[in-house]
């Protein structure tokens, strides 16, 4: 356990540097790192890490290099601007345990701009809240990782073990960014991912699948619509069947201890639908995009098999679709969930760091969304501590992160790093 004076000095160093940390977070939020546009934000982070003396690595995700891996999620977009950035700290003499500080730079789409109270990429502070797309999910966490090392440096100290500061992309849609880091050779004895967890540790995480269903219809003039087959309306029937599968999966929560007390752990979302060509023509086509979660311990392929069986049953019972079967395309997350077992040494160290920073015991939660922790937990036997600040409205309008929480989480990360890795003088 850390000496009390050193722990107090680290907390004070985070406090003294927090104004600069907030400004750096605002600077990062200003970069509109939507999918396919992440490179400018990654350039900014590359520069910030390089200034701090980290050994830098920057590369575009190579699909051919990772598609063989069981953790790969299918993708049909261009990865030319899908860059990962990793800054490596090397100690003079490695005495402690190595650490990955991971975060994702990509953010989700904005929706209608007129539904935002504030411009999404113009970060604003009101009271204790920092507003902006990505402020909570998870640019405040990315900067917290850097600021934790800054606090040690301010005291003339550095980790006495390798530390890899990762800024990855594709977290919001495939998880392939973190996977690409693993397959590039970045491994450590523990990982911290400061996602917006409400000052809690993520104990268990659902798996997620993205898929698109393509439906064909029989186009005729709208004046004789009954003689054709409407692909949009047929899609509604398939969506209804998929919601039936969602209900079946939710009923199984009693078999999954970490999720059995949640009223609705499995969620099917119809995230996008498009179809038809003309108001006076019965639609000849419709495609709809889905996201559904499933329990840890179930493989993505097993979940996909049930999805396919559900659609096949609905098609069999439909007079038109049985003669014009839809096509299923997997176009994003194909990712399994995980459980972080209690009692690891990494969790013990984090619990102590959290208690010193927050003055309260570390609580845990379960997550119904995807996080990159699965890459470390499932494919590298590395304890992933998904632990980050309080945030609201992420994936919605007027996303915001609570700055007092960011400060305390940063201190906890710095305290964890000092104990887990050990420290040496710069």
Image (spheres, rainbow, N blue to C red):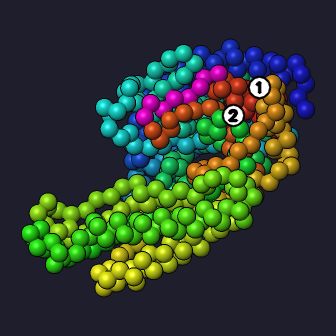
Segment colored magenta: 397-404
The numbered disc on residue 189 is: none
Q: Is residue 81 left or right of residue 151?
A: left
User: Helix or strand or loop: what does disc 1 sit on?
Assistant: helix
Q: Residue at x 75, y 58 (%)?
A: 257
Camera-side residue: 42 or 196?
196
Q: Is 399 in the magenta?
A: yes
Quick check: marks 2 and 1 in contact, CB under 8 Å?
yes
Q: Residue at x 31, y 71 (%)?
A: 234
Q: Residue at x 50, y 72 (%)?
A: 307
User: Helix or strand or loop: what does disc 2 sit on?
Assistant: loop
Residue 378 vertical placement versus 406 (above, below): below
Residue 320 vertical placement versus 331 (above, below): below
Image coordinates for residue 52, horizontal then vertical, percent: 62, 28
**Mark 1 highlights which residue?**
358
**Mark 2 highlights which residue?**
199
Tally of marks: 2
Q: Is residue 375 visible?
A: no
Chain-order first, disc 2 or disc 1? 2
């Amino acid at each position: 356990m850390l000496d009390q004076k050193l722990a107090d000095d680290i907390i004070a160093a985070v406090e003294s540097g927090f104004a600069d940390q907030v400004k750096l977070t605002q600077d990062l939020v200003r970069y509109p790192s939507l999918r396919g546009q992440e490179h400018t934000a990654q350039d900014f982070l590359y520069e910030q890490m390089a200034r701090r003396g980290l050994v830098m690595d920057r590369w575009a995700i190579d699909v051919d290099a990772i598609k063989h891996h069981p953790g790969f999620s299918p993708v049909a977009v261009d990865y030319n601007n899908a860059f990962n950035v990793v800054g490596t700290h090397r100690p003079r003499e490695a005495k402690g345990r190595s650490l990955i500080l991971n975060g994702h730079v990509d953010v989700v789409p904005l929706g209608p701009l007129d539904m935002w109270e504030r411009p999404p990429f113009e970060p604003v502070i009101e009271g204790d809240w920092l507003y902006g797309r990505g402020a909570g999910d998870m640019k405040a966490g990315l900067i917290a990782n850097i600021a934790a090392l800054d606090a040690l440096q301010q005291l003339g100290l550095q980790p006495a073990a390798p530390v890899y500061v990762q800024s990855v992309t594709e977290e919001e849609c495939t998880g392939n960014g973190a996977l690409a880091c693993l397959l590039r050779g970045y491994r450590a004895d523990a990982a911290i991912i400061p996602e917006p967890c409400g000052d809690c540790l993520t104990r268990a995480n659902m798996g997620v699948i993205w898929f698109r269903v393509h439906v064909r219809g029989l186009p005729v003039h709208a004046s004789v619509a009954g003689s054709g087959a409407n692909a949009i309306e047929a899609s509604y029937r398939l969506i209804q069947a998929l919601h039936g599968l969602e209900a079946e999966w939710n009923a199984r929560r009693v078999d999954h201890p970490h999720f059995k007390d949640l009223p609705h752990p499995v969620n099917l979302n119809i995230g996008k639908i498009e179809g038809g060509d003309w108001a006076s023509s019965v639609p000849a086509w419709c495609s709809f995009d889905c996201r559904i979660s499933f329990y840890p311990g179930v493989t993505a392929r097993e979940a996909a098999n049930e999805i396919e069986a559900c659609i096949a049953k609905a098609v069999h019972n439909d007079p038109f679709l049985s003669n014009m079967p839809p096509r299923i395309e997997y176009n994003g997350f194909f990712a399994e969930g995980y459980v972080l077992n209690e009692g690891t040494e990494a969790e013990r160290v984090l619990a102590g760091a959290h208690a010193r920073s927050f003055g309260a015991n570390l609580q845990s939660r379960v997550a119904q969304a995807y996080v990159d922790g699965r890459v470390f937990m499932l494919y590298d036997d590395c304890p992933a501590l998904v632990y980050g600040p309080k945030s609201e409205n992420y994936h919605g309008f007027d996303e915001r992160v609570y700055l007092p929480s960011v400060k305390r989480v940063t201190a906890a990360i710095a305290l964890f790093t000092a104990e887990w890795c050990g420290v040496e003088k710069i």
